[in-house]
Amino acid sequence: MEPLVQHMECFSEVLAVSCGAQVRSWDATTVRRALQWARYLLHVYRRFGGRGRAREALERRLQSRSGPLGLRSFAALEFGDARLALRLLRNRALAPVAAHALPSLLFPGPAADSEDDAPQSRLVLLARRGSALHLLLRLGGDAPRVALLRTHAELLCARLHELGGADPTAAHKLLDTLWTRGPHEHVLSVLGEALLRGLDLELAGAADCVGAKETPKLLQWLLESPEVLVAFCRQLPALRLASLAGCHPALSRAYLDLLTAWATQLHYDLQKGFWSPTQPEDMPWEELCLRLHSLCQASPLLQEEVLERLRGRRALDGDFEVPGMSIWTDLLLALPGGA
Amino acid sequence: MARDSADLASDYQFWLQKLSVWEQASSKETQQDTCLHLSRFQEFLKQMYETLKEMDSNAILERFPTIGQLLAKACWNPLILAYDESQKYLIWCLCCLMNKEPRTPGESELNSWIRSLSSHVLSTFRFNLKEVSLFAENLGYELVDYCPSLLKNMVLSLVSELRESHLNGLNTQSRMAPERMMSLSQVCVPLVTLPDFEPLVEALLTYHGREPQEALSPEFFEAVNEAFLSKKMILPTSSVVSLWFRHLPSLEKATLHLFEKLFSSKRNRLGEVECCIKESLLPQAACHPAIFRIVDEMFRFVLLETDGAPEVIAALQVFTWCMAEALGKENKQMKFSLKTYFPYGAPALTAVLSQHPEAIPQRHQLQPLLHISQLLREAVEDPTHGSQQTPFESWFLFIHFGGWVDLAVQQLLRTEAEPPEGLLWLLAFYYSPQDGSQQRVQTMVELKALLSHLLMLLRGERLSAVDVQKAAPRAPICGQLVRRLLLSLLLWTPEGHPIAREAVTHMAHTDAVTHEIVGFLDQTLYRLDHLCVEASRKLARELLQELGAQV
């Protein structure tokens, strides 16, 4: 195992410096050797991909030693050669003698066509897939956005999974970083997608899949980050939140708390005859109703929770039955089973 | 060689011009034009590579000064990069252009330029929303990591859009607009052989829209058909059938492709013929009468062209049999009436012919045979009977169903009494459909005489090979029919078995006749395999092996 690990770490270093200035000193032999290592590691990936314990051990070594530019995880072994190739092709600092030899090392010609572990066929496939994506993107429509959301959700779950249970704060740190770097809207959408996907996997009985196990980590972070939670409950569509709330009691409580808080911001406009926001950023009446309605539709349990909460508030307000006096009354009137 | 190089030079100019036109406009028409030329351009790239790999960089630039332009324009065309192996040939051509040891700054510049162009080819996909691609980077992933899964998710999204399912709570139009479908099918043209695209191709093929006109581009159908026929793509039967249903030229091409396989110079055993036919998926598709009739037409054409070649007749019989088998397996609520498959045959005749001859017990076989004979005779010889079919059409219908002639021959060799006239007529008609009624009557008379002679030999002391050989064809009975009777005699009667080898050797005195006998034995074996009659099967197999070795 040890020589294998050493190879991995060697290659990780090579990869890390491949986008920097160190490549000035490289020659054709260096490049050739690096590519051979990548090929060897591809075999390692294929061999140990399914072997849980060996894979975990290798994963841990990589996590502890590698920097952001090297091999970041076991999964990265699959694309070592392509990653290296792209970096070297783009690196202006690469020594001329290495740079001139690079294309023919990557693409030797028809002889290498049948080798499925050589960079040539894999890079060619990458090129073909890339142009396929380009063409599909040009078509427009909703598909690109949906696909990207799903892919990012998968990546997020994969990365969280790789962090494992070793450092409990690692997941939080990662998520904090993502939130800071933003953009917020996208992060929230990905979060929603990841949580929903976890739900789907659980329902499909694939509770072991990467994604299902990450849900608790995501939820925990969400519930412990007030700023994110508020934005999450504000931005995500009513139906999606309702589905998620239906399955996670902690989330449904937090969501309901927020909705009640937002409800208190509205005041009754006597002239116009409806509940209107005090500040421009407050949630309007229609949206509030929609969200509460969606929650009621999600499950009978949730409906009970919502109605109970509203009834409690109405009681505190004086239990009026006439509209316009207490927002809780009016909300109950607007919801199924509330009157 | 000089001619090749002149060809290449003019091709080069042609493609340079084409690429320039394509790069100017990115309209639907240019896209369509590009898709039409993709495979020819790839051929050109292949030829270029073969030429360039023998030359060094400077020689290349001397011969093709604008090669940089040509390659660059191609590299910036995503349709070209998406097609089959074009991206590979482009990169190889670029590599040929590299200077191994550049001596001037100009040469180094060229190398640098080639490197960046190669880099572009490998990462042509740049997501428009930069902030969004940053997210993946923040996670530590690059395109190379998530390209396969992003593509998979794109395909899944589009399949969902086609299949009218709600996309996870996002409110989207569930039915795809026709223009979008057309564009999507156009995009798929270069990509049908990419395995990631298979679910999308399937979804497009099986999509049933409300609009009467076809929503998919014809180039799409052609591309899928090509990929399927050249085995570069595996599709479920339902998708292939849908393809042929919606695009007639593809069906025709598929049938021609099958014919080429079956009727090329090499002679195929019927077992292989059956394999080929089943693999082609045409029998399954032909459960739809519309498709069956087109394939049938093409068989008819080939028959006419080859003057009724026996291998074509045999293939048609196998095809019909496979189709009937496929029909039996389908659990369709609505079964089409036979008339829809055979509009040119009288319904009564079609009904009788399509029974399984093997399923009828021996002693009841005569009656349906005579019935068939009577119906055919009426259709062929009695114009006032109301049938509008020509004799050829009646014969064409008859030959679809191979088992009856075998049965007729067996019956004739079995009956001790007078051979029934209906059976004589049937054989005479099968082998010489174009005869006038006078000639046919003559044939029947001669046939009767021949049969009584053969039966007399059988009843005699010992049958010898010489006796059999002496039973020569008598005008106007054709040689084929005589040989068939003789061979059937040898195979089906116990007296025939001991002298079979010798007799057959005598009979097979020319290559053509040997071919014919081999064909007959093969056909018999093939039918026996479906019937399981051991003794004759063993003999037939041995004879076939021996004769087959001689051919």
Image (cartoon, coloured by chain):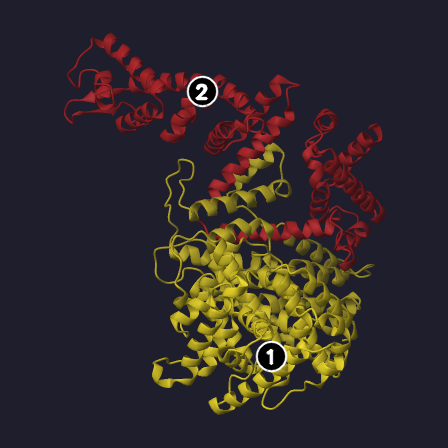
Q: Which chain is red?
A: A
Residue type at mark 2 is: His
Along the horizontal axis of the image, is B70 left or right of B54? left
Which part of the image, by quadrant, shows the C terminus of chain A? Answer: top left
User: Is B446 above or below relative to B56?
Assistant: below
Res. B546 image quadrant: bottom right
Q: Is label 1 in contact with label 2 (beta carbons under 8 Å)?
A: no
Q: Chain of mark 1?
A: B
Work out whether residue A170 or residue A303 is closer to the camera in this orientation and state it. A303
Q: Examine the rendered structure and indicate whether residue B358 appears above or below residue B153.
A: below
The answer as to whether the residues below labels 1 and 2 share one chain is: no
The residue at which mark 1 appears reads as: B309
Mark 1 or 2: the one toward you: 1
Direction from residue A123 to residue A172 in the image, left or right: left
Q: In the figure, A209 relative to B450: above or below?
A: above
Question: Which residue: 68% across, 55% down?
Answer: B118
Question: Disc 2 designates what residue?
Answer: A248
Chain letter of the residue beneath label 2 in the structure image:
A
Asked whether the viewer can see residue A17, the reply is: yes
For the N terminus of chain A, the image quarter is top right
Give chain B's shade.
yellow
